[in-house]
Image (cartoon, helix red, strand yellow):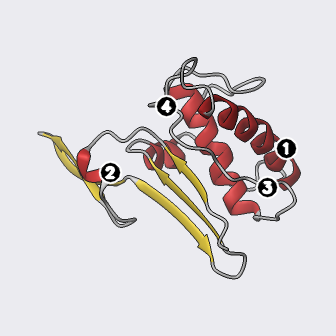
């Protein structure tokens, strides 16, 4: 059975809800026409995992605000992701207490599986982006970037 890790952010458009991983959203700004990729996808068929992050602002934030790859160690990212995902999943199960539009579904993150650096890097940075964007605090100190 294929293990799936889904991180779904708030979907800002109906198009994003029904899109594939190649969806582009065009910013209608009179001064510029910029296509922004609103989906980040990483898959590895040999390990049978998939990460899909759908959020209109995440790709831009990742490119402009996130610290570079290899800034954090893999062990650091795995530890932070385990804390963040545990709290996230707890909030999904409490829709009367936490906004169900923010915490839509659980994340199947299993600490005994070695997802690799790239997957852990993206999950960690999405959690930082999510906490800063939606004024949430999942666990511990949240870097303000």
Q: Earlier in the sequence, mark 1 or mark 3?
A: 1
Residue 86, by quadrant, is: top right
Residue 17's label in the rendered image is 2
Mark 3, residue position: 110
CA gap between label 1 and label 3 equals 11 Å
Q: Residue at x 16, y 43 (%)?
A: 28
Residue 13 to residue 40: above or below: above
Q: Which mark is residue 13?
A: none
**Circle nearer the viewer, 2 or 1:** 2
Q: Dot 3: within a 10 Å radius of its alpha carbon, few (fewer than 14), some, or many (20 or more) residues? A: few
Question: CB of mark 3 within 8 Å of CB of mark 2?
Answer: no
Q: Position of residue 142 (x, y in %)?
A: 69, 26
For residue 68, say whether it is visible.
no
| C-alpha span from label 3 to label 2 | 26 Å
Q: Which residue lies at the image location 40% right of the left edge and 65% below the top edge?
A: 21
Decide which of tag 3 and tag 2 comes sooner along the chain: 2
Crowding near pointer 1: few (<14 within 10 Å), some, many (20+)?
few
Residue 3 in the image, given as x and y percentages of width and height: 67, 66
For the question of whether residue 15 can be seen, the reply is yes
Of the residues under marks 4 and 1, which one precedes in the sequence? 1
| In the displayed structure image, the side of residue 69 where residue 97 appears, left or right | left
Q: Residue 123 vs residue 9: left or right?
A: right
The N terminus - image quarter: bottom right
Q: Which residue is mark 1?
A: 79
Instruction: State whether residue 137 is above or below residue 9.
Output: above
Report the mark closest to the observer, 1 or 3.
Answer: 3
* Residue with the most extreme left position: 30
> Where does label 4 land, which residue?
102
Residue contact between numbered discs 4 and 2, judged by CB atoms under 8 Å: no
Earlier sequence position, callout 4 versus callout 3: 4
CA gap, disc 2 and disc 1: 31 Å
């Amino acid at each position: 059975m294929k293990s799936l890790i889904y991180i779904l952010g708030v979907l800002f458009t109906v198009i994003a809800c029904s899109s594939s991983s190649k969806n582009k959203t065009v910013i209608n700004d009179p001064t510029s026409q910029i296509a922004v990729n609103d989906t980040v996808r990483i898959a590895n068929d040999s390990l049978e995992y998939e990460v899909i992050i759908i959020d209109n602002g995440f790709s831009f934030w990742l490119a402009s605000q996130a610290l570079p790859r290899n800034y954090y160690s893999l062990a650091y990212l795995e530890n932070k992701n385990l804390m963040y995902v545990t709290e996230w999943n707890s909030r999904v199960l409490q829709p009367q207490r936490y906004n169900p539009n923010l915490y839509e579904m659980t994340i199947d993150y299993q600490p005994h599986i070695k997802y690799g650096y790239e997957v852990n890097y993206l999950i960690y940075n999405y959690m930082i982006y999510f906490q800063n964007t939606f004024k949430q605090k999942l666990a511990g100190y949240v870097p303000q970037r």
